[in-house]
Each structure stands twice: as structure tokens, then as C-alpha cells.
Amino acid sequence: MGSNDDLGKIFRAARQALDLTQGEVGREVGYSASAISRIERNRMRIDLDTRLRLARVLHIPAERVSGFPAPAGPVIDTVGNVPMPDEEDAMRRRTTLLGALAAGASAVISTGTAEALPVLDLDDALFRLPNTGPAPLRTLASATAAARETFTAARYSDLSHALPSLLAAAEATRDATAGQARQQANGILARAYVLAAELAAKQHSDTAWVAADRALVAARASGMPIPIGEASRVLAITMRRSGRCASAVRLLTHEAAQLDPADLRAGAVRTTLLLTAAYSAAAGHDRATALALLDEADESVERRAHAAPDGLFTVEATKTQVDVYRIGVHNTLGTPDEAVELARGLNIGLMATAERRARAWTDTARMWHALGKGQQTFAALRRVEREAAQEARRPALRALTANLLYGPTRLPGLKEFAVRTGAVSA
């Protein structure tokens, strides 16, 4: 049996593979989100009964967690002194967004040697922007479009290096302009912060909250529907990941209702908001709402061929994209069997960007993994790496890879893949 340090990693990897938040796991076993965090970091003692309850919730074989010794040394936290859900909610209401983030953004935890997917540095990118003067709006728009292309090509390391200067220039330009030029600068600034939020969300970093909030403030100041839709979408994703699924659905459906479906670009934005709302509803275990929103998105793309709303939006409004979201929704609802035929008929190669193709293969991998199909899961994971190597190094993908590696099926090449992507050490 491995060391005690391995126990927390087992729980964390399984939770991330199922795309559950610490709060969602905590509610199933009667603990707070902070207690689950401490368990995953091996900072709280838990007895065998608690281990087995966690194992059932996270679909871990009981024998993998039953034989670990109790932690040695002093107790850092126990169940008795960890805030339970009601107390924790009250504490959260008393904590400002920026104060919570100042306590420290989520770190990337890797047991491997491969280069980790970069997290946008909180201080440099959001609180200590470089000293940069204003730029011509056309130059700034071109730079933001180039950053978007870097994101959709899944070159996240390049994007993490470019964003601080882009954000600083966009802030300076907004502050130095007035009237219509200021509105345009706010629209560009909103899109730059959307990219920062999307990059942070790739790592499940709390930095996404700050970036998404700033994106929506700038987007509303611009008065432009498409930036507002982009910013609302990334803010809703951060809400969903913190357990506020119903609030995310309300935000997205409200913003979708403000858009004219008869307008090609606005209709495409509306479709992407409906898709994200469907996934958020599924994460909140609201099957009826999730499927209804998917059907509405389906009808939207069938009425007319939707292109991307413009050159800066990162999500497509196409039939293939709707089908990918439907697979993800069924995975989240715990009904992956209902997505098998859809996945088999899916032509992921039709998707326009490497980032979207990699995400489609990710949802396919999760579907096969939930169905216990190790060989198909590994095949899908290899397609993720082929489309976008840095996607395969995301925390959720490394957790899924590690879970597959320690599963019952021995797959040739899986250990090498796990080492290469940083899921395990060599």
C-alpha cells in the first residue's frame, strides 16, 4: 500500500475525473467544501467509514482506500473544527471576492514531471499590470484577435505570457478615451479579460472569478451585446464551478433573452449561452431544464447555419457543437449511456479549432470512462493530446488519466502517456 500522501491524491483525482466540485462531494458525505479540501491535501484525519463513503461517492474501489494507515503526527484539522456547510456559507457571504482571492489562488497539483499547463499569474496579470501606455484601437483589436487565435490553437503558454501586456494596454486605452472610442475600448478590454478567465478556468484557478467579473463590467460599459454575452458565459462558468448552478442558469438565460435570434451574430451568441446554461443545469442535477435548453439550442442552429459570431468568440454555434454539449450534459447527469450513439456519429474533425476539438474528445473520454470502457477512454485521451498537447495536461485530464491508469484494465502505452502528460511521475 502507498504512503498516506497518496490517499488525498486518490480522492482528488477521482473527484476531478468526475468533474465535481469539493462542495458537491462534501454535500454527499456531510462535510464542508473546506473539509474535502483538507482531506485531499492530507491535512485532516478521516476514519475508515468516511473513506468508504467518499469512495462510494467518487466511484473508487473500496480496496484502494481501505488499507491506508491513519496520518502520523499532530492533527491539523478534524471534523469537529472544520466549518460545516451552513457555517461556511455564512463565512463566504462575509468575504469579498477580491479578499478571497488574495488569500491565494488554487495551485496546480501535479505528480508528474511534464510541464504543467500555466496558470495566469494573479499578481502580475490582475493586480500589478505592466506600465503600458494607450494604443490605437485598431492595434489593440488586432492584438486581442491574435490572443484569441492563440487560445483556440491551445497554445496556452504563449497566451499566458502575452495577456498581462494586453490587459495593461487595454486598461490604459480605455482610461485615455471618451465617448464612442471609450465604448470600443471597453469592448476590447472585456474580450481580453474573457480570455484571461478562460485560461484560468482551464486550471480550475480562482483567478477566473476576478477576470470574469472584470470582463462583465467592461462589457456592460461597452454596451455591445456580443462582449456582454462572452463575459456572461465565462462568469457563469465560474459560478457553476463554485456550486452556484441555478444562478448560472438564470444569468445565462436572462442574457440569451436579450439577444435577437433573427440577427446572425446575436443568434450565434444566444446559442452558445443556451449551451453553457444547459451544462450548468445538468451540474445542478436539473435534467429537465438541461435537456430543454439543449433542444432550444438545437432548434436555433437548425433554423439557420450559424457561423461564429465574430473573430473573437471562442465557442462555435454549430450542430456539431450542440452534439458535443449534449454528450457533456449526459455525462454530468450520470446518463452517459444515452450519449453513446451520438458520440459514435460525431464528426469532431468538423470543428474549427484545436481547442474545441480537444474539448470534444475530452467529453468523449469521460463518457467512455463512466461506462467502464478503458480502451475507448484511452483512445479518446490520445486524440486530445494529438489535437492539443497542452489540453492533455489540464488538471482534470491528468486526473482522468491517473484514474484510468489505476483501474482494472492494463492498456499498452497508458503509463507512458500518463508520464508524458504529467498525470504520474516516471
Image: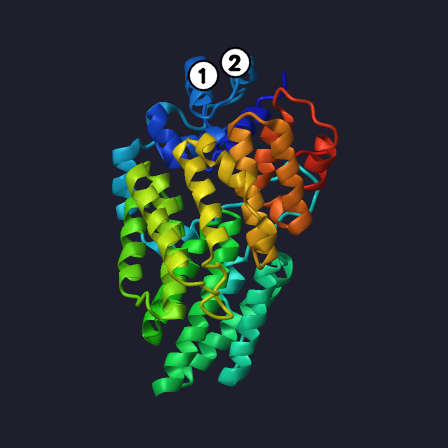
- Relative to residue 63, is residue 342 depicted above or below? below
Residue 286 in view of the camera: no
Q: Check disc 1: other Cα within 10 Å, few if <14, some if 14-19, many if 20+.
A: some
Rendering quarter of residue 406: top right
Q: Quadrant of the N terminus?
A: top right
270 or 188, which lies in front?
270
Give me the residue at 47% from left, 30% from top.
337
Q: CA distance from mark 2 to mark 1?
A: 7 Å
Residue that carries the numbered disc 1 in the rendered image: 52
Q: Which mark is residue 66?
A: 2
Rendering quarter of residue 233: bottom left
x and y, in percent, of residue 32 in the image: 35, 32
Give me the residue at 36% from left, 61% from top.
270
Disc 1 secondary structure class: helix
Disc 1 residue type (three-letter): Leu
- Whether residues under marks 2 and 1 lie with C-beta atoms below 8 angstroms apart, the answer is yes
Give me the residue at 55% from left, 15% from top.
69
Give me the residue at 47% from left, 41% from top.
327
Disc 2 secondary structure class: helix
Disc 2 residue type (three-letter): Ser
50 or 294, which lies in front?
294
Left or right: 39 in relation to 379: left
x and y, in percent, of residue 214 in the image: 39, 64
